[in-house]
Image (cartoon, grey):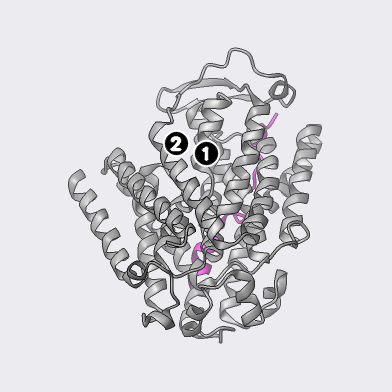
Amino acid sequence: MLKKSFIVFGIIIVLVLLAVSPVMATGQPTASAASGTPWWVWPLSLFLLTFVMGIVAIPAGVGGGVLFVPIVSSFFPFNLDFVRGAGLMIALSGSLAAGPGLLRRGLADLRLSMPVALIASVFSILGAAVGLALPKNIVQFGLGGVILAIVVVMIIAKKSEYPTVKVPDSLSTALRISGIYHEDSTQQNVDWKIHRTPVGLVLFAFIGFMAGMFGLGAGWANVPVLNLVMGAPLKLSVATSSFLLSITDTSAAWVYINKGAIIPLIVAPSIIGMMLGAFVGAKLLTKAKPSAIRYFVIVMLFLSGFRAILKGFGI
Amino acid sequence: MVPPTHLFPRPPLSPYILIPIYPIIILVYIFGILEPKIPLDQVSNFWGMKSHKYLETTGIKTGWTWLGMYRHSDFLNFFPIAFLAATTIMCYIAIIPTLIKKKDTIYAILAILEVLILVGAASGIIAAGGH
């Protein structure tokens, strides 16, 4: 079953990438008119690709934006500005769909989210403004570096189900960031508190900047910082990260909208494809083995990151 | 006392209401029911450009000008996009009165600051520089 689904995912990805092969062959994105490819091939390919991304994103434990930006900017003829704008809208739609439900169930915590979100959203606006102002090759190079760093984080980062926090720091105590959530799997209430809040806030400034600059979403970085640095339980970290994305990405998304970095013909098939794919992915989660899909995604991200660096050098 | 985690509004603020609306707008766009500002077969001439070059070439203005271009099907797509981007702001505004009522002063201030930042970004006041 696992092998079969893995092969199917691989075939679909290869077919979609072959469909956009004029770009791959030349190594440089070209407009459809110049390459002779009918215009509708690109939105259709984008829909198919994002559908597959939506399927693999949930079992792989990554957000849609992280997959979308490097892969689409590598293999489609769209300028990185529009790809980042669409990437943010994808990340935003996913997090908004999940966020309120996670809050109501008490898995995401508002007291933990709000101070962190404030810092991250300010810096994501800065990141978005800087990203749109910088030359394309520099952003490509930076994107490649960040994607390769994400690959490293995905491979080496450990997770801690219930990190030990002996003494909460004074800032988290003053802000009363602590709580209890109900763990369904063990039917127990879990008491939690956090530490190293100032360090966490500094790291979230950096994460916000990266999210805005590259349009990536930031779940890949939110969860390790909340869980490993600040000591929040893993499930709470994952849920709070999803809610945080809705705030960080909102601020950056408005910069992209206001600066004209949104093309509906790119955004529309991407959001619809990703949402339909995520629906299928959630169903497949019980059948497919997440670790195999995760390795597949890591390989795809590595190739995209490497290609983005090459493009940054003009190769 | 109601924990703050339970304060966020339920739908209709949820993006789920876009699920039936957005595909209709896309169909209006794709089937040319309303004329787009940029014809579908011409979009590919612009999507490889930097965003500022795209704006210059097409004569599209930045900011909220899309609001007045609702008769064009491509700009009609900006309405659900803007709704998505406005949802968080609406949710934050909704929790401020409750935080004030609960005398949770620090978090009320944090929420007000967040709204100001997000509204600043949405209005284009913040990050107005550069291209």
Residue drawn at 65 percent across, 49 percent down: A124
Dot 1 alpha-carbon crowd within 10 angstroms: few under 14, some 14 to 19, many 20 or more: many
Residue A234 in the image, given as x and y percentages of width and height: 48, 29
Residue drawn at 70 percent across, 41 percent down: A118
Residue at numbered disc 2: A153
Q: Chain under label 2?
A: A
Residue B10 seen by the camera = no
Which quarter of the rendered picture does the N terminus of chain A lie within? top left
Residue A301 seen by the camera = yes
What secondary structure is found at the residue carrying circle 2? helix
Q: Quadrant of residue A130?
A: bottom right
Q: Between tags 2 and 1, which lies in front?
A: 2
**Label 2 to label 1, Cα distance in Å?**
8 Å
Residue at numbered disc 1: A221
Residue A8 in the image, given as x and y percentages of width and height: 22, 55
Query: For the magenta stretch, what is the residue range?
Result: B1-23
Q: Is residue B31 above or below residue A55?
A: below
Residue A149 in the image, given as x and y percentages of width and height: 46, 41
Q: What mark, if any, has residue A158 been given in the picture?
A: none
Which quarter of the rendered picture does the C terminus of chain A lie within? bottom left
Q: Nearer the viewer, residue A80 or A308?
A: A308
Q: Nearer the viewer, residue A241 or A256?
A: A256
Amino acid type for the residue under numbered disc 2: Val
